[in-house]
Image (cartoon, rainbow, N blue to C red):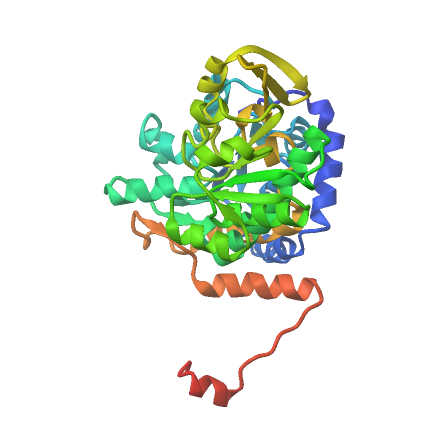
Amino acid sequence: MLSLIHDIGAAPGGHKKISWVDRYMPTLNAIGRTLKEEQTFKGKTVVISVHLEAKTAYLAIVLHRAGADVIVTGSNPLSTQDDIAAALVDEGLTVYATHGCTEEEYFMYLHKALDHKPHIIIDDGGDLVHLLHTTRTDAAERLLGGTEETTTGVVRLHGLAKAGELKFPMIAANDSYCKYLFDNRYGTGQSTWVGIMRTTNLTVVGKKVVIAGYGWCGRGCAMRAKGLGAHVIVTEVDPIKAIEAVFDGFDVMPMDKAAEIGDIFVTLTGNKDVIRGEHMAKMKDGALLANAGHFDVEINKAELKALSVRQFEARHNIEGFELKNGHIINLIAEGRLVNLAAADGHPAEIMDLSFAVQALAAKYILDNAGTLENRVYVLPRETDISVAMIKLQSMGYAIDSLTEEQRAYLNLD
């Protein structure tokens, strides 16, 4: 089947980006060499629906070199980079993705990817899984299982599993230590602020930054905002996470109160309507709204539009909304995932860990085909240990090991 991309002529620029991240992903490289030597995925079709930028592309290439027929599509209309898509096609992979596609085109690309009847899927946010449980059950006839990249998708998986409706085994790659402790915290923490600062060209120092949600992504964003000199406010619905935010040195208050004093708002909850019209009506003139959750539902855009008397392009990738009181509220990247819709996503060194986990998750599905139940799995701890050791060694670090006496003392034998 033919790929659907914008321009194959953009491939050279994409190759440069992929070559750059290749040099900073030693863990995935080490795992990839073994997979390539063993041709682990020979004869298997892998469909990947993850934000289509350089690091994702390199994961796809690693699996392709290991023998897989790899089909790639995006997981967000604004995060696809057209030169990356072109480079993958030039590399011999099949791609259905274009930057800025409509919602209709986005789902058309997912359907085309599923037409290939995958053995393994790598999903980000759960849209592939949703289709395989609804309109595309036919595409699951060869499916051995899949892996899920992000918290939002894992939540959707657990919902299916709890209802007894999950039709194939899924690995919650997001729940591996070497994914969420680093990707969600340090990756989101850095890339979110890169996206905001690159797009606005404004300072963070001295600003009142409101972080909605204090999960691992929220922790990372709050920590980086503090490091940039911001006064950080956290909003939460979980009292335990709220106490943690207080003990970490941040103010905690309801969004209704934070809305009156915040300068920059970042949502990271995975839930809808975190910032609503009632909040936006109270905001300062010039307030900046950004979302770092997977779907563009955390900031209620419909209510923001209803409050406004004028909408305009304030700056590239920033839409201004003038309210009746004359205040301007600025929405970054349409309220989509700001670190990818307004930047290049997580640093390569971080995604080195995440995609090492993904590659091993795909191998785990293959190795255990026929024995896995239709439920959500987390990879064995030994996988995290292996990934962490490779990463440490690549960074020039070594650690101690327990003596036989210490192991006996801890009853580890």
* Residue 373 visible, this orientation: yes
Q: Looking at the picture, how far across and down is residue 39, in whole percent?
A: 56, 52
Q: Looking at the picture, how far across and down is residue 375, in whole percent?
A: 31, 48
Q: Looking at the picture, how far across and down is residue 209, in whole percent?
A: 59, 39
**Image height check: is 279 above or below 34?**
above
Q: Quadrant of residue 210?
A: top right
Q: Looking at the picture, how far across and down is residue 383, in whole percent?
A: 49, 61
In percent of the image, x 63 and y 48: which residue is there?
A: 226
Q: Nearer the viewer, residue 10 or 317?
A: 317
In percent of the image, x 53 and y 43: which residue is there?
A: 233
Residue extending farthest to the left is: 164
Going by the image, does 342 lie left or right of 171? right
* Residue 120 visible, this orientation: no
Going by the image, does 268 lie left or right of 7? left
What is the quadrant of the C terminus in the image? bottom left
Going by the image, does 380 lie left or right of 96? left
Numbered marks: total: 0
In percent of the image, x 36 and y 35: which residue is there?
A: 140
Q: Nearer the viewer, residue 57 or 367?
A: 57
Residue extending farthest to the top is: 309
Residue extending farthest to the bottom is: 405
**Image height check: is 117 above or below 351?**
above
In percent of the image, x 38 and y 55: which residue is there?
A: 368
Q: Nearer the viewer, residue 358 or 367?
A: 358
Going by the image, does 303 lie left or right of 53? left
**Image height check: is 164 above or below 79?**
below
**Image height check: is 324 above or below 198?**
above
